[in-house]
Image (tube, grey):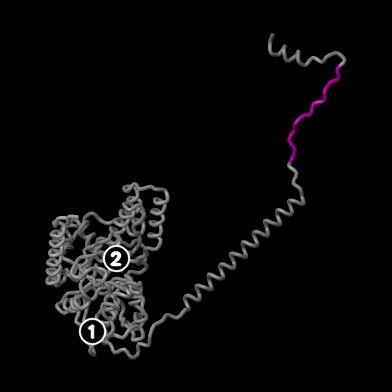
Amino acid sequence: MGVAAVCAGLMVMPAGAQEVHRDHAKYVKPYHDPVLKEMIERDKKLREQAEEKTQEIVKELKAQKKKEREARPRLRFDASGIERPSGPEAFQQAWHFPPIPQYLSGTCWDFSTTSFMESEIKRLTGQEIKLSEMWTAYWEYVNKAKGYIETRGQSLFDEGSETNALMRVYAEHGVVPEAAYKGVLAGDGRIDHADMTSHMRKLLEWCKDNNYWDEDFIVASIRQIMDLTMGRPPESVSWQGATYSPQEFLSKVCQLNPDDYVSLMSTLSVPFWTHGEYRVPDNWWHDKSYVNVPLDVWYATIINAIKEGESVVIGGDVSEPGYYGQEDIAVVPSFDIPGQFIDQDSRELRFYNHTSTDDHGIHLVGYRRFNGEDWFLIKDSARSSRWGKYKGYYMYRGDYVKLKMLTFTVHKDFVKDILQTVEANEKKAAEEESAKAAQPEPSS
């Protein structure tokens, strides 16, 4: 029997039976209860009004806090009684190019050390070659990205770094003149790394959040971000009719050897006359090549070097009341600590409690003795050095250098005796440790 026949048979009504009523489905327009609709719309409007009011209050509070913050007086001191040199011309100076600003970037370490290397080229070869700061900054960002990847996001990625980073970049990549790579694509020529570094951080944070660590891809992406702001660094440069790789330009033209430079610190946290790590965030790769010496040796070395025609790249804290851009000076006021009490211990206390921090890198280019005090001429790329009369310069009094500056870098020729002492001391310590390890265990 076919399906149709079966279905027809099922529909046959028994004799005498009444036909059953069947309901049929249909679509109708939705009905929205007007009372509930009015209540829902009222609630929505109230939420929107509440959100608008919240945003208005928050905006007003933020604006008020910003206004208060900008108007809040900064603690400084009355500098009218400070006897000081008449200006940069009063100093015995090492040769250097005029100061240039770093603008909106955290690359003081790069500007100061590049300026130092330019002075070294002049001192060693007699040439005046303006080097590219942004060349070094570019490759250091690449190094930081690799460090971030290697440590799975535990290494610092920021704008700051140390003098030794430039030496490492030069050793790895060489250097180019500024004319070959300015590293600024902005029409006004001013350096602005704010958005660039923000984009790079967000990329790296995404990689960390997603446990994604493909180094080739990440580094290529970091470079693409930088290329939009800085441009891509050149692979070769032309100089006086010849073509050089960056490594050749460093060795053959500039005649610089990064291994010829050494950084010194003075801290009780590392044994004196040894190498050790400078434990600050910007030493993100944990460089342990710093030579640690007592404060009197550290300070005397700076003076001796500058007197002999060497300049010094130096770094430390610039957050004190005695750091006064409008007055072009940095001193330690007596209400902070009297000068006669500045010593190894007072210096260490500030390093330990983080009131002396690794804020800023500068180029020490001059010295003079004035009214019984040491004064140093500082070439500075930060904005505050342009708030006073001498654009791009500060004058640091000796007490500020002793108390607040933490490290400096110099050519090894000016610290030969120190390096010999350190070598002998470390050799002796190694021999003693070896002899101790060779002794048999005492029998029980």
The secondary structure type at the circle numbered 2 is: loop
Chief SS of the magenta region:
loop
At horizontal 14% and vertical 58% (from top left) the residue drawn is 434
Q: Is residue 15 above or below residue 370?
A: above
At horizontal 33% and vertical 50% (from top left) the residue drawn is 220
* Closer-to-camera residue (305/128): 305
Q: Position of residue 404 (x, y in %)?
A: 30, 76
Q: Residue furthest right?
A: 16
At horizontal 22% and vertical 89% (from top left) the residue drawn is 372
The CA distance from mark 2 to mark 1 is 28 Å
Q: Can you identify the residue that label 2 sits on?
A: 279
Q: Is residue 319 above or below residue 81?
A: above
- 171 vs 159, left or right, is left
Asked whether the viewer can see residue 116, the reply is no
Asked whether the viewer can see residue 426, the reply is yes
Q: Residue furthest front?
A: 444
Q: Position of residue 417 (x, y in %)?
A: 12, 72
Q: Amino acid at mark 2?
A: Arg
Report the span colored magenta.
17-29
At horizontal 83% and vertical 14% (from top left) the residue drawn is 14
- For residue 374, the mark is 1
Q: How many marks?
A: 2
